[in-house]
Image (cartoon, helix red, strand yellow):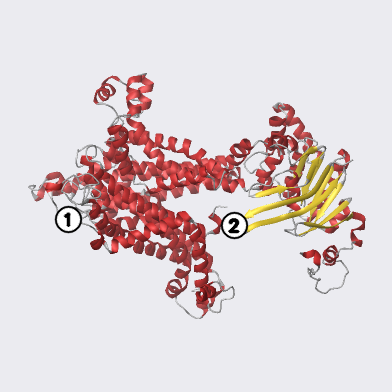
């Protein structure tokens, strides 16, 4: 018990140091930026007195370490500063944009896991077969694919040519209005909110919008998950306890999906968490293609408007999500693997 | 030729160099049997050839605009892959783009691993608090999503190919540091390092002359495996307009400029994307094969 | 009464460098007795044991002129028929419980799995049976062991669990593949005694695979000596020390003796025609 408390304490300390380091990096990037935040607020014609007033207001007259202290303190209180572009609180803006990204990346990870694990198992149980080769090549293609290009091709084929799915955006404009004015937003994720409101026409429209980008992200994550599943599964199937299960007369599906899979899941959890984090990142480019109003779009839009505080705020949020995912996978690992619990 | 083969496969090499070359020869024999890896090698070789001889291979000047011949479809005589919105030949631009791609990954390949090696070997060699601090820093950089950190860095440094390379290198070094540290830990306590230390060699000399060479093979394999990722990130930055600037024929940038005509003139965006896909697939296939050959543990049974 | 009859068993592995024969024409038959198979590493003794259960996976292949267990042809049997035999009628205890027990399943789940899945017993009945099986291998606190994960058990405990697991369905034949070589010397004797008593009490056939000549001589009725995939000699265990074959004699000469001369032990002479 004491050891567990110690482990948790060390874990939290590491987490705190990592987060501090994250903030330090964004802070440094923010200070060396050639765009003068004062100038961009007051404009070229401001007098020296006006500029000084803004400088004091932004805390830029303080020594560096004090500025960093204030930056960290504010960040811990959920205050990431003010957007130059809109003059709004960056945290509030990100809170509005983030659910769209979360919805997309989550659905992508679900696709990737549901297809990737069986594909990897299939390949591992028949090494060298046609199925194995196909899984391998499809996976390597996914590794090698520029996501933004794949998005364009997807739009071209499934929206432009076949017209099977809806185009860019999260909803058609009419449904967007409905969503905005008649439905209660619970989570900011349209699929969930429309279902909770019982607005199935909105739900259907949202599905036809999200299916393509989520499918593409799912493909990328599938490539990674199937490859790792294959390698983990091959490793487990060579273990002696597998022979034991066969000696006991267990059917092959049970040997693979129960005995081996329980062991494969242990390292696979980390892989799935990593691929989830990777999709959150990959959404930066995908969201640009699909005009998806998520965190990725927020960061790139801010970038082109030279709105550095917003860019860095977004970066911090993604970094925190990364670190959190790592921690969650670490905890899950301990739950699944009895050897790590001791 | 047969004499050379016999010399290379001699089970009792008479010199260190013969032994080493013999090992490389064996690895080559094994990788030659791996068909996918050979496909990768051919693709990477083609990239090198195309980049080196671009002016002779390309049918047109990649920069000359001809508005009377804009947006011609693929298969048009004289423009095999069609033309873009300025009437420039897409095939020629892709061929010249190979130079930019190669330049980018070449620069990353000589910067990020060097930085990683430095951090990793120093951390592993000295241990103690130096190790703790350096590895903490490495972990912090690892905690950052690579593309987004690169975006933020380019935003600060300003767009351009050198800045893009710098941003990618600054985000790519941590895995090398980890790798180099692990390798260093295994050689640090070996007898020959102790012997060199007793001869009075300085730490810097030991690290540079004896530790780094031991780490190089695994780092080189890792570099090959990472190249595909570097190509994709560089293309992503180009696509967002943060990497190479027009009118240079960078592949990501070309996709971005073709986006406007996606539904009418699909080829403008499609062709350069295919080029990215093929080249990064080539590096992945080659890296995969190299790992199978050089790391027996991961080889498929 | 013959329980198992094997004629000309061959196990071949297809490798990149051509086929490799691990077992090359082994023949033996077995009643309700204890048969020892000895030989050095790579002599094919483990493969012989696994071939009986048809547990050799591709690229390995099993061939035999005849392999009959209690009237049932093992070569022709379908995979489904084999599954019905495995566990239920033929069990196998492997070398190291560290690897042969599933690390992420509790001992209880692994013990009751066969009873519940194969025999369709309810949870309560299966657990009661498992607990009495654990008692039979002299585990004192069976209820606690049921809840434990394999890494929480010592080697000796793990191997007893493994034996209990294989003996629950009361098989007719047990194959024990180096069941004690991964254990501490002090525990070896205990585990062997348990195995010995259970096999005797239930009157089952036993194939005891080991590299330890003296152990086999003490523990078995009959011994096969294997070398390079072939049986080089078959003899009564009581006559082992009087073996004629040069290989067996060589093995015996390699054994250190307390009070024997203190010179280097002789190596094996592999120059005879039998060594081909």
Q: Chain letter of disc 1?
A: B
Q: Residue at x 17, y 55 (%)?
A: B63
From the image, tell me which residue sits under label 2.
C16
Q: Residue at x 23, y 62 (%)?
A: B55
Task: Answer above or below: position of B189 versus A341.
Answer: below
Q: Quadrant of residue B134?
A: bottom left
Helix, strand or loop at label 2? It is loop
Using the rendered image, report if marks 2 and 1 lie on a common chain.
no
Quarter of the rendering occupied by the N terminus of chain C: top right
Helix, strand or loop at label 1? It is loop
Task: Answer above or below: position of C217 versus C259.
Answer: above
Q: Quadrant of residue A224?
A: top left
Mark closer to the observer (2, 1): 2
Residue furthest bottom in the image: B199
From the image, tell me which residue sits under label 1.
B63
Residue B43 placement (x, y as % from top left): 37, 57
Q: Quadrant of residue A265?
A: top right
């Amino acid at each position: 018990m004491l050891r567990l408390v110690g482990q948790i304490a060390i874990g939290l300390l590491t987490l705190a140091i990592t987060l501090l380091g994250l903030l330090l990096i964004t802070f440094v990037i923010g200070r060396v930026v050639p765009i003068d935040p004062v100038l961009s607020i007051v404009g070229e014609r401001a007098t020296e007195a006006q500029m000084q007033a803004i400088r004091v207001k932004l805390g830029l007259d303080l020594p560096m370490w004090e500025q960093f202290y204030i930056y960290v303190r504010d960040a811990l209180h959920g205050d990431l500063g003010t957007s130059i572009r809109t003059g709004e609180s960056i945290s509030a803006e990100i809170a509005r944009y983030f659910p769209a990204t979360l919805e997309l990346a989550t659905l992508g990870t679900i696709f990737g896991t549901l297809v990737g694990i069986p594909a990897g198992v299939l390949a591992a149980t028949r090494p060298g077969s046609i199925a194995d080769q196909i899984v391998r090549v499809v996976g390597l293609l996914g590794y090698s694919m520029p996501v933004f290009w794949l998005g364009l091709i997807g739009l071209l084929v499934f929206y432009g040519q076949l017209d099977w799915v809806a185009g860019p955006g999260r909803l058609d404009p009419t449904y967007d209005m409905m969503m905005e004015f008649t439905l209660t937003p619970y989570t900011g994720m349209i699929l969930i909110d429309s279902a909770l409101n019982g607005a199935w026409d909105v739900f259907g429209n949202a599905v036809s919008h999200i299916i393509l980008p989520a499918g593409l992200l799912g493909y990328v994550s599938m490539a990674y998950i199937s490859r790792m599943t294959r390698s983990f599964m091959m490793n487990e199937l060579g273990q002696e306890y597998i022979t034991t299960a066969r000696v006991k007369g267990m059917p092959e599906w049970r040997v693979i999906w129960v005995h081996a899979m329980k062991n494969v899941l242990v390292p696979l959890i980390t892989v799935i968490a990593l691929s989830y984090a990777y999709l959150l990142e990959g959404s930066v480019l995908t969201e640009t293609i699909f005009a998806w109003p998520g965190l990725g779009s927020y960061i790139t839009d801010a970038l082109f408007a030279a709105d550095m505080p917003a860019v860095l705020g977004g970066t911090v949020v993604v970094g925190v999500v990364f670190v959190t995912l790592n921690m969650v996978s670490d905890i899950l690992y301990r739950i699944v693997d009895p050897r790590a619990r001791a | 030729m047969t004499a050379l083969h016999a010399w290379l496969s001699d089970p009792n090499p008479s010199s260190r160099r013969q032994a080493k070359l013999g090992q490389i020869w064996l690895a080559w024999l094994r990788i030659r049997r791996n068909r996918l890896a050979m496909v990768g090698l051919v693709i990477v070789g083609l990239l090198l050839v195309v980049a080196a001889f671009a002016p002779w291979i390309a049918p047109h000047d990649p920069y000359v605009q001809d508005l009377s011949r804009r947006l011609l479809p693929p298969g048009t005589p004289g423009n095999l892959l069609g033309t873009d919105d300025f009437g420039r030949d897409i095939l020629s631009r892709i061929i010249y783009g190979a130079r930019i791609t190669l330049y980018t990954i070449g620069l990353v390949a000589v910067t990020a691993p060097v930085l990683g090696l430095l951090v990793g070997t120093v951390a592993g060699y000295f241990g103690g608090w130096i190790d703790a601090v350096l590895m903490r820093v490495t972990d912090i950089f690892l905690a950052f999503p690579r593309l987004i950190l690169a975006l933020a860095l380019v935003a600060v440094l300003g767009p351009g190919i050198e800045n893009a390379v710098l941003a990618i290198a600054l985000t790519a070094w941590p895995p090398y540091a980890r790798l180099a540290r692990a390798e260093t830990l295994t050689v640090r306590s070996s007898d020959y390092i102790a012997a060199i230390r007793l001869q009075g060699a300085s730490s810097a000399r030991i690290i540079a002359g004896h530790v780094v060479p031991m780490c190089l093979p695994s780092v080189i394999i890792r570099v090959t495996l990472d190249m595909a990722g570097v190509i994709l990130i560089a293309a992503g930055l180009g696509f967002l307009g943060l990497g190479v600037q027009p009118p240079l024929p960078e592949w990501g940038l070309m996709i971005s400029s073709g986006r406007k005509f996606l539904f009418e003139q699909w080829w403008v965006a499609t062709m350069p994307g295919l080029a990215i896909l093929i080249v990064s697939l080539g590096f992945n296939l080659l890296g995969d094969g190299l790992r199978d050959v050089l790391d027996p543990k991961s080889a498929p049974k | 009464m013959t329980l198992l009859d094997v004629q000309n068993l061959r196990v071949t592995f297809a490798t990149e460098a051509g086929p490799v024969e691990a077992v090359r024409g082994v023949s033996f038959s077995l009643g309700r007795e204890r048969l020892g198979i000895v030989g050095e590493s790579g002599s094919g003794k483990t493969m012989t044991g696994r071939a009986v259960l048809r547990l050799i996976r591709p690229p390995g292949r099993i061939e035999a002129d005849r392999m009959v267990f209690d009237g049932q042809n093992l070569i022709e049997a379908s995979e489904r028929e084999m599954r019905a035999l495995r566990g239920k009628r033929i069990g196998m205890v492997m070398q190291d419980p560290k690897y042969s027990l599933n690390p992420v399943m509790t001992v209880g789940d692994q013990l009751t799995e066969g009873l519940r899945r194969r025999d369709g017993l309810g949870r309560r009945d299966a657990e009661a049976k498992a607990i009495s099986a654990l008692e039979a291998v002299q585990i004192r606190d069976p209820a606690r062991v049921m809840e434990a994960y394999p890494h929480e058990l010592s080697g000796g405990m793990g191997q007893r669990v493994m034996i209990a697991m294989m003996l629950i369905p009361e098989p007719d034949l047990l194959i024990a593949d180096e069941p004690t070589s991964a254990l501490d010397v002090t525990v070896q004797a205990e585990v062997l005694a348990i195995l010995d008593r259970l096999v005797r009490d239930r009157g089952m056939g036993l194939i005891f695979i080991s590299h330890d000549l003296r152990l086999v001589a003490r523990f078995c009725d009959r011994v096969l000596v294997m070398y390079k995939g072939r049986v080089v000699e078959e003899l009564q265990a009581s006559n082992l020390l009087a073996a004629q074959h040069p290989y067996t004699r060589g093995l015996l000469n390699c054994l250190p003796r307390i009070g024997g001369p203190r010179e280097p032990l002789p190596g094996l002479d592999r120059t005879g025609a039998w060594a081909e």
